[in-house]
């Protein structure tokens, strides 16, 4: 089946699940790739924690920051469902920079991420990306801003209203009354930009090898494995990734390393048209589409279950 037919099939599957978005799969050694809507900027949500980790670790590699430095962190005191780690702590904690990196990246702890942003502010993370010649990712604000959306101001029985606003209030130019969903104000990145970042981490040239190795390990220890992992993990492959979730947005970017030495970077950036918090079927479709694109690039054929 041709790449055009594979992409058409992928789009149809997303549409049936009430999803739209951008996907890109790239062979990290040959550069061959397949995807669609790869240049469209999307609100990044927690995906921004990957460039944050790179920026912090680059400072550590240059000797500008000691990974053992203790940081006093106030509790997040968040009671809404979803956030993890320090976000749910009730008492202050003292944590080393290196351990904050684990919490921020592997556990997706937003309080830990903002403690790192205190050390390397968003503008400096953006400058680090420019220095490394990684284009297409905008880092504009701290992660804590993601917890200040209409969903946090509504009771549990009304969260669907926040999702309806997220779905229906966008403009054709990707503006939005919710700042975190407005591509001119939010942290953003395209599928291509995140695959470029993964490429730079898995096949480092400008990034310090120690930085790249640590980020690969942190993404390999990602605890959130409900989206693409079920279709990309096996005894003969390792899936290392970072998820991002914000209202109706469901993202995941990562790399599948196969036992035969081949590695494929994958970016799946999606938005749901269904105003519901729990959508396991949508996440299963994301994995299905990612696997179809991956398998076509790796073998040239569709899996039997497509």
Image (cartoon, grey):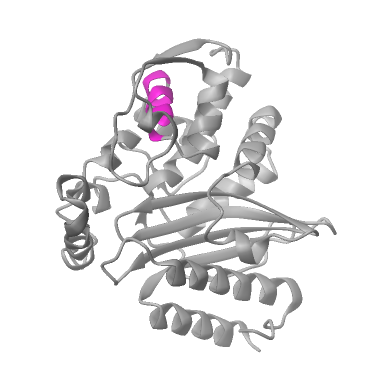
Q: Is residue 61 left or right of residue 275?
A: right
* Residue 37 in view, yes or no: no
Taking the spot 68% from the left edge, 81% from the top edge, the residue there is 303
Which of the pair 33/273 is nearer the observer? 273
Quadrant the C terminus occupies:
bottom right
> Which residues make up the magenta segment?
110-119
The answer to which image quadrant residue 256 occupies is bottom right
Magenta span has 233?
A: no
Whether residue 86 can be seen here: yes
Q: Is residue 263 above or below residue 75?
A: below
In the depicted structure, whether residue 281 falls above or below residue 228:
below
Question: Residue 302 at x, y = what percent?
Answer: 67, 83
Depth check, front residue: 51 or 196: 51
- Residue 138: x, y in percent? 37, 43
Front one among 164 and 56: 164
Q: How many marks?
A: 0
Name the residue: 60% across, 12% down: 63
72 lies above or below 102: above
Which x, y percent locates residue 171?
A: 18, 65
In the drawing, does residue 64 fall left or right of residue 47? right
Q: Please tell me which residue is depicted at 30% across the width and 34% down the height of the picture.
A: 144
Residue at image position (34%, 44%) is 187
Quadrant for the N terminus, please. bottom right
Most distant residue in the right direction? 260
201 or 258, nearer to the observer:
258
Residue 16 image-quadrant placement: bottom left
x and y, in percent, of residue 249 in the image: 35, 59
């Amino acid at each position: 089946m041709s790449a055009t037919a594979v992409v058409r099939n992928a789009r149809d599957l997303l549409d049936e699940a009430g999803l739209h978005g951008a996907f890109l799969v790239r062979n990290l050694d040959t550069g061959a790739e397949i995807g669609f809507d790869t240049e469209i900027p999307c609100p990044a949500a927690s995906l921004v924690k990957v460039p944050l980790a790179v920026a912090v670790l680059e400072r550590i590699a240059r000797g500008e920051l000691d990974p053992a430095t203790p940081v006093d962190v106030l509790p997040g005191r968040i009671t809404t469902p979803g956030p993890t780690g320090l976000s749910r702590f009730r008492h202050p904690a003292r944590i080393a920079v290196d351990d904050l990196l684990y919490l921020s990246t592997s556990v997706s702890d937003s309080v830990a991420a903002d403690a790192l942003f205190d050390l390397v502010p968003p503008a400096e993370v953006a400058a680090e990306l420019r220095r490394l010649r990684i284009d297409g990712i905008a880092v504009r604000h701290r992660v804590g801003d993601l917890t200040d959306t209409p969903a946090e101001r509504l009771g549990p029985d009304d969260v669907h209203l926040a999702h309806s606003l997220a779905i229906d209030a966008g403009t054709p130019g990707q503006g939005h009354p919710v700042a975190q969903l407005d591509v001119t104000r939010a942290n953003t990145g395209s599928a291509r930009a995140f695959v470029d970042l993964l490429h730079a981490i898995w096949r480092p040239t400008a990034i310090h090898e120690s930085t790249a190795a640590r980020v690969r390990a942190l993404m390999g220890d990602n605890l959130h494995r409900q989206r693409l992992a079920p279709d990309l993990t096996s005894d003969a492959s390792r899936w290392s990734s970072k998820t991002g979730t914000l209202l109706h947005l469901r993202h995941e970017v990562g790399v599948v390393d196969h036992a035969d030495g081949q590695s494929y970077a994958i970016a799946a950036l999606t938005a749901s048209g269904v105003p519901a918090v729990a959508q396991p079927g949508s996440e299963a479709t994301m994995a299905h589409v990612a696997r179809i694109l991956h398998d076509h690039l790796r073998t040239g054929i569709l899996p039997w279950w497509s």
